[in-house]
Image (cartoon, helix red, strand yellow):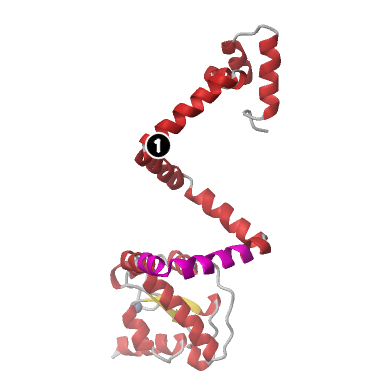
């Protein structure tokens, strides 16, 4: 229940008829006295709305900043709600899809410009995403198993490996990271979580088409030499 709903307003009206002051009503209902005043005086409310509209017209940048702040603070909640809505409502998905096709045809250049700008500002994300979908694409072409990978599985692997290369223990933050198939796709390995680790680029290149076992054995022998 919301304390600003009709039920609360009716209660306020009844109390006012009994001669209770705005302040006392506000206190009893747990809302501000100004809002009680506005509820119970339609003209005052109309004047208030008129002033608000004026203010909004004169301060568009404040409204924009306010919205931006609110969105930033609540982004996780907003995204979660949007994802749930999107996942649960097939009709909504269809409408969104149609809408974005229409929007794209009508604003093609603007959309492309925005996408281009986003790509420029998010190079690392793009690189990561391309790498991930490239693996999927290759797994598909090699006709091997493709597991359903959880979102941000690379972050999970990173945490699991304490940020170190699976083979040589180098700090991935310093070297950069490659998504590495322990049994390579070319040798029938799956593109699935159980077959994935993160490695430094050097290990990834040296390992090439060896299995993890073969590569670890090679590293061991080289260390002895
Ligand atoms: Zn390494």
- Determine the residue located farthest toward the top in the rendered image: 19
| Residue 124 found in image quarter | bottom left
> Relative to the observer, which residue lies in front, 221 or 119?
119
Residue at horizontal 68 percent and vertical 28 percent from the top: 6
Quarter of the image that includes the N terminus: top right
How far from the left and from the top, in percent, is residue 174?
28, 69
In the displayed structure, 92 sits above or below 3; it is below
Q: Quick one: quadrant of the C terminus?
A: bottom left
Mark 1: few, some, or many residues within 10 Å (few <14, many ≥20)?
few
- Is 88 on the left or on the right of 152, as rendered? right
The reply, left or right, for residue 35 in relation to residue 209 is right
* Residue extent of the magenta highlight: 94-114
Residue 193: in magenta span: no
Residue displayed at 64% across by 8% down: 20
Q: Main secondary structure of the magenta part?
A: helix
Residue 200 x %, y %: 34, 77
The residue under the point 40% across, 88% down is: 215
SS for callout 1: helix
The residue that mark 1 highlights is: 57
Side of 198 relative to 28 (left or right): left
Q: Residue 207 appears at what percent x and percent y?
A: 38, 88
Displayed-image quarter of ligand 1: bottom left
């Amino acid at each position: 229940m919301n304390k600003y709903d009709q039920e609360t307003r009716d209660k306020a009206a009844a109390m006012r008829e009994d001669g209770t002051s705005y302040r006392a009503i506000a206190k009893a209902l747990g809302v501000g006295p100004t809002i009680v005043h506005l509820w119970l005086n339609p003209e005052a409310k109309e004047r208030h709305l008129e002033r608000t509209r004026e203010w909004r017209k004169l301060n568009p940048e404040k409204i924009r900043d306010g919205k931006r702040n609110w969105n930033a603070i609540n982004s996780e909640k907003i995204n979660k709600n949007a994802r749930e809505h999107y996942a649960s409502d097939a009709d909504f998905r269809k409408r969104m899809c149609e809408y974005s096709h229409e929007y794209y045809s009508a604003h093609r250049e603007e959309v492309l410009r925005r996408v281009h700008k986003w790509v420029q500002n998010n190079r690392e994300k793009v690189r990561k995403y391309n790498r991930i979908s490239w693996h999927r694409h290759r797994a598909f072409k090699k006709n091997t198993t493709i597991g359903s990978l959880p979102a941000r599985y690379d972050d999970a692997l990173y945490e699991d490996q304490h940020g170190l290369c699976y083979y040589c223990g180098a700090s991935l933050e310093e070297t950069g990271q490659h998504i590495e198939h322990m049994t390579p796709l070319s040798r029938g390995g799956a593109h699935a979580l159980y077959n994935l680790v993160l490695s430094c680029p050097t290990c990834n290149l040296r390992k090439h088409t060896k299995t993890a076992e073969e590569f670890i054995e090679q590293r061991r022998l080289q260390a002895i030499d």
